Amino acid sequence: MSTLKNTLIGYVSYRGREGHYSFLLHRLTGLGTLLFLTIHIIDMAWFYWAPDLFEEALQLYRSWPYLIGEIALVFAVYFHGINGLRIAIVDMFAPNKWTIAAERNAVRWTLVGSLILWLPSAAIMLSHAISASNEAAQMLDKLGIF
Amino acid sequence: MATRQVKISQNYETIAWKWMRYSAILLIPLVFGHVLLQDVIVGVYEINADYVARRLGTWFFQAYDIALLGFAFAHGVNGLRQVLRDFIHNPKTFRLVSIALFIFWAAITAYGGIAIVMAVNAKLASL
Amino acid sequence: MQVTIDVFRFDPEKDQKPHFDQFVVEAEPVDRVLDLLEKIKDYHDGSLTFRRSCAHGVCGSDAMRINGVNRLACKVLVQDVGTRIKVEPILGLKVKRDLIVDMEPFFDHYKSVLPYFINDEAPPEKERLQSPEARERFDDTTKCILCAACTTSCPSFWSDSAYVGPAAIVNAHRFIFDDRDQGAAQRLEILNQQMGVWRCRTAFNCTEACPRDIHITQAIAEVKKAITSGKLD
Amino acid sequence: MANVHQYEVVVVGAGGAGLMAGLYASKTAKTAVISKLYPTRSHTGAAQGGIGAALGNLEDDSPEWHTYDTVKGSDYLGDQDAIEFMCAAAPDVVYELEHMGLPFNRTPDGKIAQRRFGGHTNNETGKPVTRACYAADRTGHMILQTLYQQCIKNNVTFYDEFHVLDFITVNGAAAGVVALELATGELHIFHAKAVIFATGGHGRVWEITSNAYAYTGDGVAITLRRGIPAEDMEFFQFHPTGIYRMGILITEGVRGEGGVLLNDKGERFMDRYAPTVKDLASRDVVSRAMYLEMKAGRGIGGKRYLHLDITPETVNKYAALDGRVRPDGSPYTVTGEEILKKLPDIIDFCKTYLGVDPVSQPMPVQPTAHYAMGGIPTNVRTEIVIDENNTVMPGAYAAGEVACVSVHGANRLGTNSLLDIVVFGKEAGINAAEFARGASFQPLPDDAADFTRQQLDALRNGSGKERAADIAREMKEVMFDHVGVFRIEEGMQQALEKVRELKQRFKEVRVEDQGSRFNTELLNTWELSNLLDLAEVTAASALARKESRGAHARDDFQERDDKNWMKHTLAWLKDGDVELRYKPVTLTKYEPKKRVY
Ligand SMILES: Cc1cc2nc3c(=O)[nH]c(=O)nc-3n(C[C@H](O)[C@H](O)[C@H](O)COP(=O)(O)OP(=O)(O)OC[C@H]3O[C@@H](n4cnc5c(N)ncnc54)[C@H](O)[C@@H]3O)c2cc1C
Ligand code: HEM
Ligand code: SF4
Ligand code: F3S
Ligand code: FES
């Protein structure tokens, strides 16, 4: 029996509470961030290793699908970071705060905190994109990417 | 009541666990600072080769980016290793995977690290 | 009132694959889910199998997944879950038949943490003295009834059944923080291994599931802390 | 052919008595403990209040007082040699449990904490005494866990989820047991030099009970079928405070901590029935008082329940009225928090099952079938005796609730059963191992598993005209109504006839499940056959006893009759009939007196 399959079934079918979903989200956002980070390190390094590719990558970063991904990434980083900090602090300094009431509250506040940071961030990013979109569209046209 | 003490040997698991948490505390300023600055405030539309060159030209950002690379990527790869550990049950296979992850981590870190360091030289050379 | 209840069925002697059977039974709002299962067994289908004994949440026989969450069937009333109920076996242990799973791996993990009092000094003639505060220190983890609701709600255990699981850690905690006991170092060494406390990702399902309201995640965190700090208080 | 295992000592049951026996027997003999439940699921885990031992940690106390209280509590039917033995052994065995790590609550100076319990008194003042050693309200849980932990530590061999169905005897001596492995449905023969029965009680005979589903009297039924009598089966304890309609137990510890019983008018009626100890009179007295209150229409709202009140206001009010003081002489008062601390599980039960918070509301309670004083007759060495001359069956032992030593006589005092299981469980383990050392295996008969197979085949091949669940329900109802707290001739006669009719109908029952793995329907049905046998023996024994004593209270014979009835009942089940004989009570120094509290 595949434990991977059963585990994934458990992840989605178990009716856990805040902790369950925060665990899933933490894992998902961590892995997502890692995927992005790996790509990001490589393409930024092209600045030195392969300047041509670097330019191309920069163009790619300015496409709409990428922009949506970036906005999601920012949320992922906020949530993962705040949630990770929450876990680290409770684990190391206040193990006795691992109680049902405190945990449920803390997870909710983590989400609220992430949103408070993310919503304005997302708005700013979108406004950048919109104001840049004319230029960008023209540039993209020229490069023949779309 | 006097505190009772025991001596427990600290192994890879213990260290990795602590590492995930200590790095977390350091990562907050590093990662959040980076994300806020590059993705939100400056924005990808303002970033180009020139910008990167200027940025890496300052010692501050060079150190910053090296710290970021060192902590975030190591943290992330160890995180990935933990996730994989959940699903790879054969100790031998897992050892191989760990080695592969280590090589992956070392290679990418070196690739990125060299770029950051060398970027300064490149910049200087181009002047 | 009428309750519709979907029950997970699997008889390895007959079935290739598991399926659900639906039963409609008469119930009172204060009936336990266990009462419904008994009713089904008595009047609808005698072959439905599940474990139970005390019927009031103290023996730990009947942990199962009720509407998606691990609960004791004898501690959930119809009024708590409504008139559509789905009952499945707990996750991560092999299903032997219907709602019965193989408990052996669970008890093996329990046994692996030296869940017994260790003190080789000759005891006094009367009781060993212990202050009420020292007794209070580990009170919470003495409540465990080994029902497995916690361990089988843990995502780390689903993906790797070699993880000792929250129940074993709870029972180790009960002795680690008992100031009469001298086996703490041995137990902490065991829990410091890859299959020990470090597999806990604080998913918290265990604590939410525990029918004895044990602060499991807290106990695990205290054990982690004892390992990293070497202090037992 | 069945699988055969050989052990010097086989223990049937892994509750407090079985684990203690297993722990001790395995020190010197090759031992297996067989249990139909995982050991930690045993009913010992449900015990709440405490274990009795005259440690005197909080106030003066002595084993002699404990002995006298137990003799009196038993309504002079208890065997005094056994009671003396148990009460004298009590302090040491409690210390032994503590040395095994059992987490008792503590007094401020670090000793084992004790609380009051019904029937336990200071013999000089007649006032209740703190004798019950406790671990919150889960003392039994802690005993069970601690003993199981010690068994793991000492590598005791377990056969978990093996259901014992028959007792093999050869040449009038024990030779082993036959068990069905739940996981496979296969039969196993355990060939042994000594067999210890520790299978617990049979409260499932009654409709409202505090007992587990597994409390089906297997041990007594198995031995009855093998020609061994059952002793004092008419004495079954009804605990005064079960949760209304569910029967879940509210420990006497609630009253020990100051809780009081109130009727519909808000009266503390126990004043009238037991002026000295009031709510802490022994269980038969309280249950009877409750019955009379309800019969007189003073049940809450005229219904069949009363209130048990542990709210701080009520406790403090009556503690002041009684002039109750703490050991240091200050007046006894409690706060909601203290109650929560001392009785966490009770509060949880009430919240879960009743939606009532006992810290602020009274609990609806009614008497609930609770404890079997009767059982397999044994002597003080826990050897099974098979007749009125106390003839011992070599190699056969019994301990715990399944046995009748008899330390509880006609009525058990709270906390004495946990004591009984550890003291006599230990005794059984030691004695059985010693016996095994000096004995050789009886030859195993070829047809050892045949009787078991016949029984199971009969269940599988019935006509199916009757449904087991209906029979069970009718038996429980008739037993609760007529062989319950109060009894009269006609009622018991009716019950006996009904049970016999049900036994006939039971022959038409058919088990639907033809599978082998985890065939719980088969085993549950077999258990029902045990309950029917025990119900019959109980009703017959009760009908014959024309007096009121302890838990056996008759409307038509209201007085105790020491002249004719100071004797133990022995009941044999012989082809569809119950044969009754009697044996004398062992007296040492306690002369029967009228019992007042
Ligand atoms: C709710 C409640 C509260 C109580 N509170 C107290 C208290 O405060 N103080 C006190 O002194 N007493 C108390 N008692 C009474 C006391 O707990 C029991 O009498 C005592 O625990 C019985 O122990 P035991 O070892 O005889 O049986 P159990 O602990 O019930 O063990 C029986 C064992 O036999 C096994 N078994 C049964 N049949 C078979 C079979 N056919 N094949 C194989 N195995 C079998 C079972 O699996 C189990 O392991 C209480 C009882 C109840 C129900
Ligand atoms: C912003 C600051 C960050 C903080 C405070 C943080 C914190 C943490 C902590 C405490 C853990 C351990 C969780 C546990 O053991 O239960 C963790 C796991 C993880 N982190 Fe981070 N992290 C941060 C950034 C990152 C980044 C940038 C990445 C990606 C490269 C990342 C990837 C991961 C991964 C993959 C895991 C493993 C997740 C799992 O086991 O489910 N984290 N993080
Ligand atoms: S810790 Fe709680 S959930 Fe886990 S086994 Fe013990 S009682 Fe059950
Ligand atoms: S659910 Fe599992 S991950 Fe930890 S907090 Fe509980 S053991
Ligand atoms: S039946 Fe005992 S816990 Fe549910």
Image: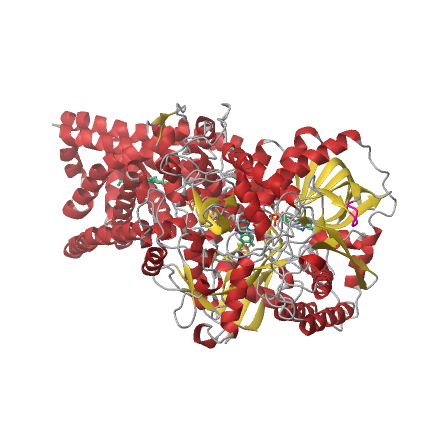
Quadrant assignment for ligand 2: top left
Task: Report the number of discs.
Answer: 0
Q: Is residue D487 visible?
A: yes
Q: Look at the picture and state if D280 lies above or below C224.
A: below
Nearest the camera: D321 or C36?
D321
Name of the residue lying farthest toward the left: B127
- Residue sitting nearer the eye, D510 or D492: D492
Q: Is residue C136 left or right of residue D388?
A: left
Whole-percent x and y of residue C191? 45, 32
Instruction: Check the image and tell me how it is coloured.
Output: secondary structure
| Nearer to us in this view, B122 or B34 | B34
User: Would residue D387 be counted in the magenta stretch?
Assistant: yes
Q: Which residue is found at the position 55% from the left and 62% from the top?
A: D368
- Report which quarter residue B54 is drawn in: top left
Q: Which residues are magenta?
A: D386-390
Residue C115 place in picture, x, y as percent: 51, 35
Q: Is residue B84 magenta?
A: no
Could you say which quadrant of the image residue D235 lies in? bottom right
Dominant secondary structure of the magenta stretch? loop
Near-viewer residue (D570 or C221):
D570
**Can you give x and y, in whole percent of width and height, for residue D33 in the image?**
67, 40
Describe residue A91's horizontal placement relative to residue B88 as left or right.
left
Asked if D206 appears above or below C216 in the picture, the reply is below
**Residue D204 x %, y %:** 63, 61
Residue B79 in sight here: no
Q: Quadrant of residue B28?
A: top left
Instruction: Specify whether D118 is left or right of A23.
Output: right
